[in-house]
Image (tube, coloured by chain):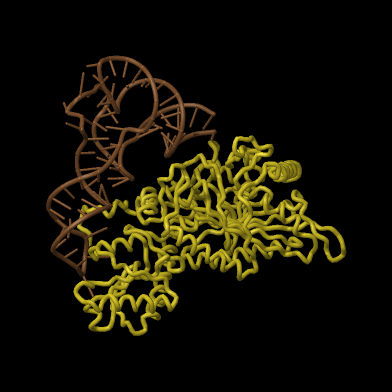
Amino acid sequence: MASPGKAKRGIPPKSDFNNWYPAIVEIADLVDKRYPIKGMDVWKPYGWNAMSLIDGLTRFQMRRTGHEEYNFPLLVPEDLLDKENQLVSHLKAARDAGVDPSELRMTEEDAGFKKEVYWVDRGGDNQLEVPMFLRPTSETPMYTMFSLWIRSHADLPLKTFQIVNTFRYETKQTRSFIRVREIHFFEAHTVHADEQGATDQIAEDADVVQRLLHELCFPAIISKRPVWDTFPGAWHSTAVDVIMPNGRTLQVATYHHYRDQWARAFDLTYEDSNGDTQFCHQTTFGMSERLLGAVVGMHGDDNGLIMPPSIAPIQVILMPVAAHADENVKPKVEALATHLERSGFRVRIDDRDLRPGTKHYDWEIKGVPIRLELGPRDLASNQCTLSLRTGGKTEVPIEGISSSISQCLETVSEELRNRSHAQASELIRTFPGVTQSTVGWQLDGPLEDDIIYELAFDGNDADAEVLEKLTGLTLLGDCVPPYTESIPCAVTGKPTTRRQHLARMY
RNA sequence: GGGCCCGUGGGUUAGUCUGGCCUAUGCUAGAUCGUUUGGGACGAUUUGACCCAGGUUCAAAUCCUGGCGGGCCCA
């Protein structure tokens, strides 16, 4: 083991998560934060590889579900935004007029979108007549084109996605992968003939999310956001929140059912089989590099990252041992690497001229799931030494090594799932409850820091504000699955199966 | 929008309050040579920094003003 007091390349303990996280993303060589713009990190090859593998999982799911990949322009002319702003203010007016006022939050700001984007208003020396902005998301450019492409019901459903960079002018503190100004973003946009089509799409998105969470080996809270937190123009929004080790939730994915609200703003219509013009129904599904942030946060430990095998840029690191002492070591390791590559594993040989310990720690920091050592001793017995990043070391015969590796990768995945489930459930507690007295609302018990509270809640926005003000936490919304039996709502006391969470969000 | 704090080699850090002893400290990382290699090796040599522009002063990393960059808190 490391001698006490010896700095492990300056990695703080993971229990000090707020220092551990920013340190590990650089020490593990995922990004370089020194680029002179806040919130714009340089992706290093190891980090970019991992992200590309996550994108690969996403692309696989998109292909499986019949989406096609597009690539839309980065710049959007300002006048297109007007349609969107009209939509938002139109919806607001409608809500203000027709909806239960208790569902509205008074602090709602008017479309402050323009303040959150980067503007391009010059071309060379010339001032542009119509300024352009860098996409913060692509509804506007995509729907502008969709309205040209969609003419009849035969064009539907249209299922599209793209994986691109988007931009937000963040003024708050930035954190690698978690809050950045240039966002590596996945967005799927679909168009359907009717509400049911869009509703089915939302169900498909939910299924895709579950499959991805399984492969990334961590759980999440899936919640239908409260009305006041619904994406502008959406009928309803569902969010996927990962529970980070510091008790904060990280929203890693969302899907929105737009009904025909955006279609009305962008004049997205089609001719149905009766020859009548109908508005389309739409959905969007977004995810980002936050998935990688969640992988880092959920699985890492005091010694560095632990990559889930599904996205590990290197699944097996091969270490020749004492190659100088036995000339047969090197060719044997190379043959082993070739064999494993042909079996479909991502493999690398580390033949650097370094002390073995140094190399071991290197790959532990990077979170490579399996390490294989092969030296003269192993050569004699025709086996090699296999170590798992999650712990454990065994001798395995070289004969049939591929299936041993497969099994071990699955073991690592399972172990990561167990650990992350245990970790997440430790951070969720039952809400102590609130009581109204002559002095106002009071908590029925003390709250712990860095904890997420679960409760039955069936109140309106005013009731939610009572909870949020009192706890300093945010209500995530209705989560699935709900309670199986009715429980009294924490504020109103009426029985409900609606299960919700209060959390500090990133 | 309001308030507060901070900019020193690639990273981290001492020095700033109280100007001079700073030709700027330690750790880490990097380079070269040699000895090493089944869990963080050692020796020798060596590269590398006071955010920018003004000002005060005999003298500025240190004090003042502004800019740029970064962080925190409150709305």
Give coordinates of residue A425: x percent, y percent: 45, 60
Q: Quadrant of residue A115 in the image?
A: top right
Give coordinates of residue A400: x percent, y percent: 37, 84
Q: Is residue B34 left or right of residue A58?
A: left
Count of number-bearing discs: 0
Q: Is residue A201 above or below residue A122?
A: below
Q: In the image, what residue occupies the spot 57% across and 65% down?
A: A59
Find chain A in the image and tell me its colour: yellow
Q: Is residue A240 above or below residue A436?
A: below
Q: Nearer the viewer, residue A499 or A488?
A: A499
Find chain B in the image and tell me its colour: brown
Q: In the image, what residue occupies the spot 22% across and 62% down?
A: A1
Q: Quadrant of residue A371 in the image?
A: bottom left
Q: Nearer the viewer, residue A487 or A18?
A: A18
Q: Quadrant of residue A350 in the image?
A: bottom left
Q: In the image, what residue occupies the spot 58% across and 68% down?
A: A61
